[in-house]
Amino acid sequence: MRRQIELIRIFNIPIKLDLSWFIIVAFISWTLASGYFPTIYPGFDKSIYWMMGIFSAVLLFVSVLLHELSHSLVAKKNNIPIKGITLFIFGGVAEMTEEPTTAKSEIKMAVAGPICSGALALLFFIISKFFTSFLPIIPLIGILKYCVFINLALMIFNLLPGFPLDGGRILRAIIWNSTGDIKKATYTTSRIGSSLGVFLIIFGFFNIFTGNFIGGLWFAFIGIFLKGAAESGYQQLLTGRLLHGIKISEIMTRDLVTIEDSTTLDKLVDNYFLKHRYNSYPVVSNGNFIGIVSIHDVKQIPRKDWDKVDVRKILDSKIISLCVSPDDDATSAMSKMVRKGLGRIPVLDNGKLVGIVSHRDIMQIIKHKMDLSV
Ligand SMILES: [Zn+2]
């Protein structure tokens, strides 16, 4: 199953929707329709609240999209290639294939998002004032006022000075500009980002224990996400610089130990897990790669059934959507590993398994490059 669907292309930038987005749209619609709107605007039918909830959730999605799009357009103007925009559970990310090369272009790119959100808040405010004065349809005004609020919230939250938030990027560019040291600038601002994350997690738990369960959970989740993004952002900058220009084909392992899908689990354990040092193996069926099997998967099946169950029953086929190609940049494999917590990623060339790239392979290259200071 693919986790992302491509919606449309705007200015030739593909807009992708992560499946987690649907959960969050449903969740936001529900919280708005069952709590927020009935409290502020009492006396309407349930169906009206649901309509308000769904419209508001979709407009939130449009607002986030416009915020990310404004980053992307400025990036394009500054010759920073953008692979696409993905909307997911915590908002949106514009995927840059390269980091900005100058502090100036970083600032221009980072301020575009908050400016866009601020402008949208103002626009929704003017429209809501217009309707309040000339056409007072309460549910519509409710939606518009909510849009003012979320765009202001988007602007303020993103201006917090922790990397990788926009505010953190601005601060990073300022430090980068004055010291000339992007590594130090990223280190400082990602520490702030990580601390902000911890603060949000604590604040979230405080809210949970004082009765604001959903809001608290929300803060805690955003905190965890921000902390992770801040830490991996710094790591990514370091590794990205060292891995620049290295193709997967140069570092992958080519002679692979693969497993036929009809192998039973007792043979898998005796002939593979106990003989080789790997924790997981690629599985093939008639020469085609169909997934990966790990020790963890085997443990799900009781030992007494190991001679009756074959690998096909327990393999993980989701990995196929995460595979890389030999021509991909090593950084893309690295960021996938960090994001998904994977140790090894299969390398496919036109659907055929040609190698495996492991975290160890990449770390080795990084270590060599650091030792040689190249
Ligand atoms: Zn932004």
Image (cartoon, grey):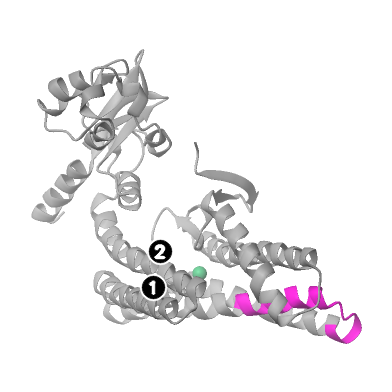
In this figure, which residue is indicated by the disc labeled 1?
103
Image location (x, y in percent) of residue 187:
26, 72
Which residue lies at the image location 39% right of the left edge and 39% below the top edge?
322
Image location (x, y in percent) of residue 171:
38, 79
Amino acid type, mark 1: Ala
In this figure, which residue is indicated by the disc labeled 2?
100
Asked if the residue at tag 2 contacts the one at tag 1, i.e. Cβ–Cβ closer than 8 Å, the answer is: yes
**Is ligand 1 closer than 8 angstroms to the Cβ of mark 1?**
no
Q: Where does the magenta region start and end?
A: 132-151
Where residue 45 sits, quadrant-wise, is: bottom right
Image location (x, y in percent) of residue 145:
71, 79
Which residue lies at the image location 64% right of the left edge and 63% below the top edge?
30
Which residue lies at the image location 15% right of the left edge and 28% below the top edge?
273
Above or below, 104 against 10 in this view is: below
Name the quadrant of the C terminus: bottom left
Task: Residue at the far right: name it.
Answer: 134
Is 138 part of what is drawn in magenta? yes
- Tag 2's secondary structure? loop
Left or right: 246 in relation to 123: left
Where residue 48 sits, quadrant-wise, is: bottom right
- Tag 1's secondary structure? helix
Image location (x, y in percent) of residue 370:
13, 55
Left or right: 165 in relation to 237: right
Residue 209 shows in the view:
yes
